[in-house]
């Protein structure tokens, strides 16, 4: 199906997210505005105004009632999805690079940037799911990353762990109750920043994308690298598709180098790999800048990508996508059916 | 055991330096101080004369000595022996050390008369090499190394699957690989920093050449060990002779060889030279030459035109018996091998000569039984004399054929690979010198009297021309006028030519077969076995297409055209492909595969290679950062006779059946391995997922098991909402009554 081009932003996209039902897409960009869109036709549902700087991150809670955002104006904000009302603003010393709800929506995590004497931190707040309720100012947890700054983080299954990806290519596992560092391992190449960390639906494993041109599938409890997906370009984002065993990787030459090369060389494509066999299956072209984020429909019906070019491209998967199977997968499916 | 920090001797502190014997080092690194004796030479081998004849002898010797420099007044000292006669030697002082060196270089070994030959050496050298103890008084039998079995240099030809090898240079690594069609090439050897600038095969594939600041090295054999080393500091280019007997090295910097800059295996002879021709078997230099300045010309506006150096400068005859160099506009010097002496002691004067080419094979002219090599040359218009193309035989230096040409602006010489034809591509300008057109003058070498056929039907300039190897067809590319300062290169046309079919199997006149217009193509690559040709666009910013043509396509009978005289060609475009950023195209020596390369030598965009079969179907593509070179390993000429080759061709169907079976079997095992690996991966994955699911279940993680969706509490008390929709389709009001 033809992709739907969402051209509501004036500057580079930084993150796009589906709500758990998959009917709404939230997008944030460097133009200070949060947009909500209907995923099936690309119509704009509304915008959330208030941030004073570039936005870096967005997340929606499991009931699609609360929306969290963070940006370069050093604030993390909570909005009511339905009305666009600003519910809460938390202020920090540095900008917020990543926000994420836990799977039950009761905890909200934020990653702060390292700058001017402030170390990078991961903060956690308890959230009252009721939009009308007063939200707390008290941090349930504060983790200081003094080794290497955290760039991305998220809650594992049951909110057991907080997993963070770092600037030096390492991944750390923290106890989400105490904030104690349990384990840390070098997943990507040394000093190659981890640019994204997205969860599998059950949050027992996740995928990381890195500037070292690879994406890795990592188990949440052991931090073992399960699979590795090498590409030929620095990666900004990686997502795991439900239903089909694929991963989608997005990236391209760094934005600052783009003007010196042709669009062809930039490799601004979304790449599909088979999650288990680690083989490239296909690519989707379209953006004329690097892909900054790819998000997958929670029911696996489509995906969308936000690019440095200021566009969100929403794709709905066609039938062949679902029909495609490796021979051994078909065998497996047959065996299951016969049981 | 290698010395390590722990087991270093402890008594270092009490070490007495004066105890060490440094004499060997002192000798090795002896610095020659300026002793003021550099202007002296010692002359030996003079006749022994009585004292009264001494003055006469000195006068006689001085005449020789003064030919290279100025001997100081009273600079000759000829000591007398006890018997009152001269001793047969003399000491001579020149005005300057440089003159003394010149004397050694030029006068050493000059005969004085029948019995006396002058030996001239520097005084300092006599002291250095002839000092007591330096020369062993006793004769020692030279030690002859026992024979050592070396690797077979052509072992790669014995591959059971008949695959070809290629060398790939990417990043700092050079590796030799077997071509495995669709599969990843199999590494034979892969080494870091094997070469400093580029790699090159010898023409029959025996050696791989690596380039270094100190010189050139040849590698080969199964173990890829070093076979030979040729020290040539600052070497830029190398060129092999066709049968791999000799190698030419060239550096833009003149060599510096003297006592303070010794170079292994080079002598003072090579000082100041740019070219060295070496014997590969011995590793010794045969002769060295300096670069000749190409006479600078000026263009229409009077600016000097920078001429490109011709490479190879020294051109080899096909059998390695002769090597020739042209002095542009004047003459051609031919040297005989292996002695490297100038043929008949003089260069062949050809006034105005612009270019020459040897026949690429030993020519077989009708009625000529004696051995000969041929070369073709051309001269431009000189005064009232027309431009000329000539064919000369060697060693007889006889001109076989010449042809006069008019209005020539440039000419290029193209030999067919069997030396059956030479095509002279003549660019002719009109009288007003405003427009250019190209004529082809084709010399039929093998026919009696070397007849010339002219193709003058071309209206445009031919920018590229190529003969079919071992065949008699050719392809050329023409282009219209190139508008000045135009950013877009003009469109080109590709034309195919073939001879008419005539009775008796002789080759008829060359006829135009077809022209494809509005192309961008500029390069022609024939399969080394003929029949197939790739016409490509290289060095272009916009187009990167490659056309794969078949010139002997088997057309079904009924389709063959009637009427026209039948030509020995049946053209068919097999495929057109595109390789972004392609810079080089390489046919493998068997004519089965084509490798196209986007080399980092030219640009940095999508470096890597594509592998096609001869029909143009893509077998494999690989992107490798900093990919620089891919070169197929050439094969030596076949050892099979013509009859044996014909026999194989006849039974091709049977052979191909076997090969196809082999291919299929190989593919099946490979596929099976891949499928098995996938099956294993899938099973492992499913097992891991199951363990995770159990773990979640035990921990009671409902949300996670629901794939992240929050279970709504209202699930158990389902609320049924009944909605009645009433739709009014039509409403009419009627007044009753």
Image: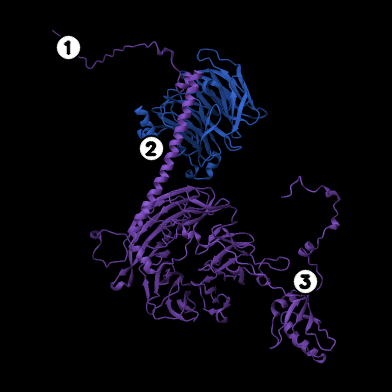
Q: Which residue is mark 1?
A: B734
Viewed as shown, does residue B63 lie left or right of A98? right
Q: Callout 3 environment at 10 Å: few (<14), some (14 to 19), or many (20+)?
A: few
Badge 3: chain ID: B
Q: Element under label 3?
A: loop
Whether B6 is drawn above or below B210: the answer is: above
In the figure, the shade used to draw chain A is: blue
Sequence order check: which comes first, mark 1 or mark 3?
A: 3
In the figure, the shade used to draw chain B is: purple
Q: Element under label 1?
A: loop
| Visual colour scheme | by chain
Viewed as shown, does residue B112 lie left or right of A128? right
Could you confirm whether marks 2 and 1 are on the same chain? no
Q: Which residue is mark 2?
A: A327
Q: CA distance from mark 3 to mark 2?
A: 81 Å
Q: Front-most of B561 and B176?
A: B176
Could you confirm whether marks 1 and 3 are on the same chain? yes
Check whether the beta carbons of the residues at disc 1 and disc 3 lie within 8 A of each other.
Answer: no
Q: In the current view of this chain or complex, which residue is farthest to the top?
A: B737
Q: Which residue is mark 3?
A: B134
Q: Element under label 2?
A: helix
Rendered image quadrant of residue B436: bottom left
Q: Is residue A30 visible?
A: no
Whether B8 is drawn above or below B269: the answer is: above
Instruction: Pick the quarter of the image with the C terminus of chain B.
Output: top left
Badge 2: chain ID: A
């Amino acid at each position: 199906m033809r992709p739907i081009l969402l051209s509501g932003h004036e500057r580079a996209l930084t993150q796009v997210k589906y709500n758990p039902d998959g009917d709404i897409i939230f997008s944030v960009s460097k133009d200070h505005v949060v947009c909500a869109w209907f995923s099936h036709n690309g119509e704009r549902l509304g915008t959330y105004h208030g941030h004073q700087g570039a936005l870096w991150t967005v997340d929606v809670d499991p009931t699609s009632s609360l929306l969290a955002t963070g940006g370069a104006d050093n604030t993390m904000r909570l909005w009511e999805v339905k009305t666009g009302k600003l519910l809460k603003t938390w202020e920090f010393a540095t900008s917020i690079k990543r926000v994420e709800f836990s799977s039950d929506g009761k905890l909200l995590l934020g990653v702060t940037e390292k700058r001017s004497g402030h170390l990078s931190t991961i903060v956690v707040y308890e959230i009252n799911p009721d939009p009308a309720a007063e939200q707390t100012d008290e941090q349930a947890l504060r983790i200081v990353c003094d080794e290497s700054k955290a760039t991305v983080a998220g809650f594992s299954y049951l909110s057991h762990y907080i997993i963070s990806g770092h600037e030096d290519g390492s991944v750390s596992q923290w106890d989400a109750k105490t904030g104690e560092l349990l384990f840390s391992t070098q997943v990507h190449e040394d000093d190659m920043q981890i640019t994204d960390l997205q969860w599998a639906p059950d949050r027992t494993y996740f995928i990381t994308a890195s500037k070292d041109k690879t994406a890795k599938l990592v188990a949440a409890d052991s931090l073992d690298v399960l699979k590795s997906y090498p590409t030929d370009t620095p990666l900004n984002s990686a997502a795991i598709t439900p239903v089909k065993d694929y991963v989608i990787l997005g990236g391209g030459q760094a934005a600052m180098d783009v003007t010196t090369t042709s669009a062809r060389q930039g490799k601004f494509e979304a790449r599909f790999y088979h999650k288990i066999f680690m083989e490239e299956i296909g690519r989707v072209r379209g953006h004329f800048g690097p892909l900054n984020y790819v998000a997958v429909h929670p029911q696996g019906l489509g995906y969308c990508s936000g690019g440095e070019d200021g566009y969100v491209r929403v794709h709905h998967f066609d039938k062949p996508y679902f029909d495609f199977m490796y021979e051994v997968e078909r065998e497996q499916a047959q065996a299951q059916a016969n049981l | 055991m290698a010395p390590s920090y722990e087991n270093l001797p402890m008594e270092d502190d009490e070490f007495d330096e004066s105890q060490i014997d440094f004499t060997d080092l002192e000798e090795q690194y002896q610095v020659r101080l300026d002793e003021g004796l550099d202007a002296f030479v010692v002359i030996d081998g003079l006749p022994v004369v009585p004292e009264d004849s001494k003055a006469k002898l000195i006068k006689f010797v001085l005449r020789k000595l003064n030919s290279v420099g100025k001997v100081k007044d009273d600079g000759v000292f000829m000591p007398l022996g006890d018997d009152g006669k001269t001793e047969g030697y003399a000491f001579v002082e020149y005005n300057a050390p440089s003159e003394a060196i010149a004397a050694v270089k030029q006068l050493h070994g000059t005969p004085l008369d029948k019995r006396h030959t002058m030996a001239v050496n520097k005084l300092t050298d006599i002291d250095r090499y002839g000092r007591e103890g330096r020369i062993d008084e006793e004769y020692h039998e030279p030690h002859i190394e026992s024979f050592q079995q070396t690797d077979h240099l052509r072992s790669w030809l014995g591959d059971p699957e008949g695959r070809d090898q290629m060398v790939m240079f990417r990043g700092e690594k050079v590796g030799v690989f077997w071509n495995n069609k669709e599969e990843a090439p199999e590494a034979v050897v892969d080494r870091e920093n094997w070469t400093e600038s580029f790699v090159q095969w010898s023409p029959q594939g025996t050696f791989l050449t690596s380039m270094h600041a100190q010189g050139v090295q040849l590698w080969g054999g199964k173990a890829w060990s070093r076979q030979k080393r040729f020290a040539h500091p600052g070497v830029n280019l190398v060129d092999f002779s066709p049968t791999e007997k000799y190698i030419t090295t060239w550096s833009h910097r003149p060599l510096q060889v003297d006592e303070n800059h010794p170079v292994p295996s080079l002598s003072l002879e090579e000082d100041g030279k740019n070219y060295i021709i070496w014997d590969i078997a011995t590793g010794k230099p045969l002769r060295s030459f300096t670069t000749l300045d190409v006479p600078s010309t000026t263009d229409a506006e009077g600016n000097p035109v920078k001429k490109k150096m011709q490479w190879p400068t020294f051109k080899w005859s096909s059998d390695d018996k002769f090597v020739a160099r042209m002095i542009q506009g004047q003459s051609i010097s031919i040297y005989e091998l292996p002695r490297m002496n100038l043929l008949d002691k003089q260069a062949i004067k050809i006034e105005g000569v612009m270019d020459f080419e040897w026949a690429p094979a030993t020519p077989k002219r009708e009625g000529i039984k004696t051995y000969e090599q041929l070369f073709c040359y051309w001269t431009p218009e000189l005064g009232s004399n027309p431009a000329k193309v000539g064919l000369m035989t060697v060693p007889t230096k006889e001109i076989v054929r010449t042809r006069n040409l008019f209005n020539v602006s440039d000419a290029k010489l193209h030999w067919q690979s069997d030396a059956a034809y030479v095509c002279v591509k003549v660019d002719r300008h009109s009288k007003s010198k405003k427009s250019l057109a190209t004529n082809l003058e084709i010399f039929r070498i093998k026919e009696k009297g070397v007849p010339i056929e002219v193709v003058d039907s071309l209206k445009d300039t031919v920018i590229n021309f190529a003969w079919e190897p071992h065949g008699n067809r050719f392809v050329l590319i023409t282009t219209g006028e190139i508008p000045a300062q135009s950013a877009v290169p003009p469109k080109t046309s590709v034309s195919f030519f073939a001879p008419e079919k005539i009775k008796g199997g002789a080759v008829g006149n060359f006829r135009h077969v077809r022209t494809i217009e509005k192309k961008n193509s500029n390069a022609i690559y024939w399969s080394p076995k003929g029949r197939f040709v790739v016409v490509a666009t290289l060095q272009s910013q916009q187009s990167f297409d490659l056309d794969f043509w078949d010139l002997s396509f088997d057309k079904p009978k009924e389709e063959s055209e009637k009427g026209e005289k039948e030509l020995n060609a049946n053209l068919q475009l097999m495929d057109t492909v595109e390789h972004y950023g392609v810079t080089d195209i390489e046919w493998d020596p068997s004519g089965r595969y084509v490798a196209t390369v986007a080399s980092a030598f030219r640009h940095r965009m999508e470096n890597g290679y594509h592998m096609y079969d001869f029909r143009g179907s893509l077998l494999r593509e690989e992107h490798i950062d900093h990919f620089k070179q891919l070169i197929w390993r050439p094969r030596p000429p076949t050892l099979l006779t013509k009859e044996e080759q014909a026999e194989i061709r006849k039974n091709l169907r049977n052979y191909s059946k076997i090969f196809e079976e082999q291919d299929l079997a190989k593919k099946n095992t490979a596929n099976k391995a891949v499928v098995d690996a996938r099956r294993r991966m899938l099973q492992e994955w499913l097992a891991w997922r199951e363990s995770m699911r159990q773990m979640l279940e035990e921990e009671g993680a409902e949300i996670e098991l629901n794939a992240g969706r929050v279970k709504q509490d209202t699930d158990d008390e389902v609320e049924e909402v009944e909605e009645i929709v009433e739709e009014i389709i039509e409403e009419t009001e009627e007044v009753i009554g």
